[in-house]
Amino acid sequence: MYEKKVAPIALDHIRIGDPFWKPYMELVRNHVIPYQWEALNDRIENAEPSHCIRNFRIAAGLEEGDFQGYCFQDSDVYKWLEAVAYSLMWHKDPELEKTADETIELIASAQQPDGYLDTYYIIKGLNKRFTNLMDRHELYCLGHMIEAAVAYFKATGKDRFLKVAIRFVDCVCENFGTDPGKIPGYPGHEVAEMALVLLYGVTGDEKHLKLAKYFIDQRGQSPLFFEEEEKKNNNECYWNDSYMKKQYYQAGKPVRMQKKAEGHAVRAVYLYSGMAEVASATGDASLFEACETLWNNIVQRQMYITGAIGSTQYGESFTFDYDLPNDTIYAETCAAIGLIFFARRMFEITGESRYIDVMENTLFNAVISGMSLDGKSFFYVNPLEANPESSLKDYYKRHVKIERQKWFGCACCPPNIARLLSSIGGYAYEANTDEIYMNLFIGGEIEAELGGAKQKLSVETGYPWNGDVAVTIHNDAESEFTLAVRIPGWCENYSLEVNGEKIAGADVISNGYAKLKRNWKDGDTVVLKMEMPIRLMEANPRVRADAGKVAVTRGPLVYCLEEADNGKLLQNLSLSDAPEFNCHFEKDMANGVVVIDANGHRTSEKSWGEDQLYRVYSDNKKEDVRMTFIPYYSWANRTPGELLVWVRR
Amino acid sequence: MYEKKVAPIALDHIRIGDPFWKPYMELVRNHVIPYQWEALNDRIENAEPSHCIRNFRIAAGLEEGDFQGYCFQDSDVYKWLEAVAYSLMWHKDPELEKTADETIELIASAQQPDGYLDTYYIIKGLNKRFTNLMDRHELYCLGHMIEAAVAYFKATGKDRFLKVAIRFVDCVCENFGTDPGKIPGYPGHEVAEMALVLLYGVTGDEKHLKLAKYFIDQRGQSPLFFEEEEKKNNNECYWNDSYMKKQYYQAGKPVRMQKKAEGHAVRAVYLYSGMAEVASATGDASLFEACETLWNNIVQRQMYITGAIGSTQYGESFTFDYDLPNDTIYAETCAAIGLIFFARRMFEITGESRYIDVMENTLFNAVISGMSLDGKSFFYVNPLEANPESSLKDYYKRHVKIERQKWFGCACCPPNIARLLSSIGGYAYEANTDEIYMNLFIGGEIEAELGGAKQKLSVETGYPWNGDVAVTIHNDAESEFTLAVRIPGWCENYSLEVNGEKIAGADVISNGYAKLKRNWKDGDTVVLKMEMPIRLMEANPRVRADAGKVAVTRGPLVYCLEEADNGKLLQNLSLSDAPEFNCHFEKDMANGVVVIDANGHRTSEKSWGEDQLYRVYSDNKKEDVRMTFIPYYSWANRTPGELLVWVRR
């Protein structure tokens, strides 16, 4: 009953032609992937060197030197290769493929006789390998290697990289487990769990699924493996001092007993994604229940309105229910991407649109805010409130940047965005033998085998600027299948037509989708028109940070105030009691966005002397102003300045 | 022109009999001083040991062992002795005096032949003394030793301790200075500067003033002494990583070039107090100007409405103008006390009441909040907003406690409160040959030589619960002098009568005081009646944290909401547009306080499901409530819970 109801469509069957998303994919292809390659090779001036390729060359014996960079540096090249694979699926590029092949050869040449492959320990001493699973990242690197290898295999049909990954998996299988003489450990940073199930999908080798299941089941069992490791290594976990302790790694108790999302946010959602995969592949009810509980905890208690997660810089972690500070926030781009991974799997298992609602919200807000509109700079942290002086001078907001950066020493986010955006079509459309799901409204052409025959859907949409979506069916012969069109959670009014004929939503809605099941013939059209009014949102009163405040949204987009439009001291702006909103498309702003303006007030500074810090309250000092809201994701693409999402009312 | 216009009255000439303050003094005498003595001797169960007395015993050769505790542990016994001295001035206690004398003997017996006296280096190795002025606290301990020694000399007439202090000063004079072969350094933690001027006041020895002036003038001169020290010690200052760098110590540039209060807040205000002392004693205009600039920066840009200072836990420091977060605040009790020291000196030099306005505000709010009503527990940090879960689970609010603690490893605050409260009469009344200033309205009997004759004032007041103050003059013969009665900055309406005859304020107000100059005869009475309405205050709109919020005050007291009266989630309360306030004295609450209530609203949680984090804003969900405000200083004396000062409006 936990078998996936829906599965990915091969990426080479999806050709995105969407005015909103295609440019992002082109940016990744034309800028991010080449830039990243330069970065991996330490050829970017004024940026922290990556050391990544060099570490592989040293490990392969091609160069002398010591390991440099983070212990998980290897994963950067894997994520890059994954993005390359996705890119090759929709845009052939022999030269890029050649570079990738050579890189894979380099990786392969560093592999040890027993399959082990982690440059940190190959260079620093193999006798220490697998001795600090808590804080070194061998199994994390393994996970990313698998994901890249599978993607590259699917993109090119070449199995060289896949075989390298399988050999490393074999090595891990040989060394890990609860049998005597084996290491009863598991990853300190999760990702291998979901990767192994992905690998199992390609190899069909039960051993691969079994290893994933072992990692999940063994995690947090008593005695705690990481505590035993500490004893052996005579060291102390940094997080023992915090209230999280081993839950920083989601390893303080068995995963089925974890009721709240805790600890490092990226680790957490990567683990939960793996749990969902294993639950599905093994039909494990208690494991799936744990996923649901954790999912609900996140989206009902610990998620920002932008879909971001991770309330604190301390441990880059979740904190506690309803604790969603806007200015000391962490909201790492990678964590948002991980939430999308988790959402996708929960959707695939349940077929329920509520998971895609979160995916869409996170994608349009918390994720794409992570990359500049020119694809050249990135946010690690995606705040909902920021100002330049605090970022500079407040130690506890130093992680909150008001300008995106070119690259990072710990470069997890840029390649993560790259691999997500290059494969975005796969998130938009999924299918099974009889159904095709339109999850995200992204224009393009999608081919799938449905009702036993080849179908092609052409999709055109003005999303997210309007809610009009038109689908045309192309097939050789009439065939019965279901076109499941997601009706987003934000959408209150819409109309749906098939070949010009109105469909009553109530008749066809199931699990949040309008399920149009019929004999489709070539040229049939479906037109969805969603009203996209401006919506003022409020947060649960248990969210202290948002008390008395509202957020402006339209369709899937959260809006924000920026200094460039509204001047400094954004917290002095408040919306009118009955705000009148206008919106219009500004083609020259931020590559074209719908801008919203509204009437509001500004607490005037004029009546205040330079020397006055407090005074008796007087009511008569508000100026009427017009407030300008822009889509949150597009902030910080002009003059650096203040940002505010939650506005006083 | 910077000579002090007003000077302290000897504490044994002031007998406090005030219903508000006398109990605090009794608490200090009966609880704090004895408790602290036990603490200094490591006799408190379940509290971190102080090691303080033991360190002295080891340094004196009376016991074997290693130094333990902070490097500035010595200062704890000095602050204790200072509090004891003040206490002895108004309450003879031969047994306590005996204990103090014995302690002084112990201290003396640890003194080195050349006068050096710091147990840290005496125990750990004298060859290292004076080599890390930046982070070790020898000169800080010296400062507190001097302050205690002078106080004890004034209280008892015994000069044993004073001579010990002078010998240590001699040793420092011998070793420090810009002459060749001497150390061109100065204290990493200031306090010696003001202490040395105090000593100079007793000894009249120019050398003592000169050393103070040297410490002030040399501070921050190029090349920076602390940078030179770093090079020698081959270490790195922890704060080099922050934007503060050496300004953490107020040592990044010459003091006259410092325009904003920066760095560690206690250090800062201790330095500024010393600067004011030296400026006054040497008639240094540029130095006094620097004091004014720094004072203005603090009170106009960096001070909480409670009079607290220090916006961040990071370095326990000032941050930047208008940065006054209420929940990540530091607001150390000691910093507030230091601001009172600074205020007192600025007042003594200028005779202006605006300094006393700040002193009074800080005293009634930021300082006495630091001690529980039973005198048995203390706050280091005095937040304006707190909740139990954040204090427990938010790493960046872990310093914000919602319950006062018994004692601290770094026990600076409790003895600092003790010495301030034991000498509070000296802050309330100051004088010169012809004038007596009533700065704080504290009931009691004050003797002073005025107009060449002995005068006694009897003061009765219901302050801070009402604004009625009655003064009766007692003297043997009619004499001309000025009774300067401060009209507080918060007071908008008052009446003033001398012997039942109304005095028009406009005729007599100067520098914020009603200056009643006349021939006073025995039995003359002065009656001041200040109206004490509830006042809603607002912060300058540049203060982001307080936007859209107000604070309730009455007289000198800031009020707050507490969970015990108002339930959880205080941020959901807002005052009505036109709030109706009531206030009444509750004799059984918090030793008797005026409680304020007002009508307001609570954003209802009732309409929210457990599963809903965000929803479309709806206006119709506020419940009418009665809000109960209590004096800020009295919070956290009942069931631990939430706190809020700035309330939405």
Image (tube, coloured by chain):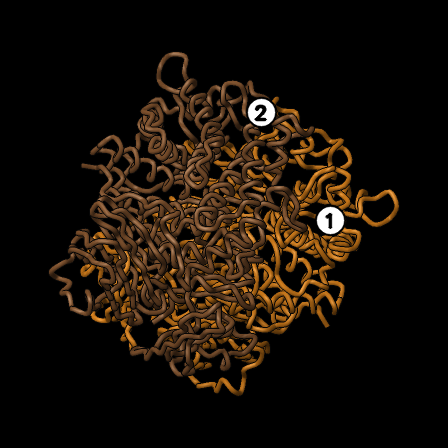
Chain colours: A orange, B brown
* Rendering coords of residue A378 (x, y %): 43, 47
Residue B433, by quadrant, is: top left
Residue shown at 19% from the left, 54% from the top: B478
Describe the element under mark 1 as helix, strand or loop. Answer: loop
Quadrant including the C terminus of chain B: bottom left
Report in which chain the residue with disc 2 lies: B
As rendered, which of A635 and B503 lies closer to the eye? Answer: B503
Question: Label 2: few (<14), some or many (≥20) within 10 Å?
Answer: many
Q: Nearer the viewer, residue B80 or A408?
A: B80
Q: Position of residue B471 (x, y in %)?
A: 28, 62
Q: Which image quadrant for residue A125?
A: top right
Residue B515 position within the rendered picture, expressed as x and y whole percent measured from the top left: 18, 55
Q: Residues within 10 Å of mark 1 (few under 14, many from 20)?
A: many
The residues bearing labels 1 and 2 have C-alpha atoms spaced at a distance of: 51 Å
Look at the picture and state if B536 lies above or below B349: below
Specify whether residue A405 is in view. yes
Left or right: where B476 falls relative to A235:
left
| Chain of the residue that carries numbered disc 1 in the rendered image | A
* Residue toward you, A318 or A640: A318
Q: Residue at x 73, y 56 (%)?
A: A216
Q: Relative to A54, is B384 on the left or the right?
A: left
Indicate which disc residue A186 carries: 1
Residue type marked 2: Ile
Q: Residue at x 25, y 52 (%)?
A: B437
For the view shown, which residue lies furthest in the top direction?
A: B180
Residue B122 disc label: 2
Badge 1 amino acid: Tyr
- Tell me: residue B92, above or below residue A324: above
**Residue farthest toward the right in the current orientation of the protein:** A180
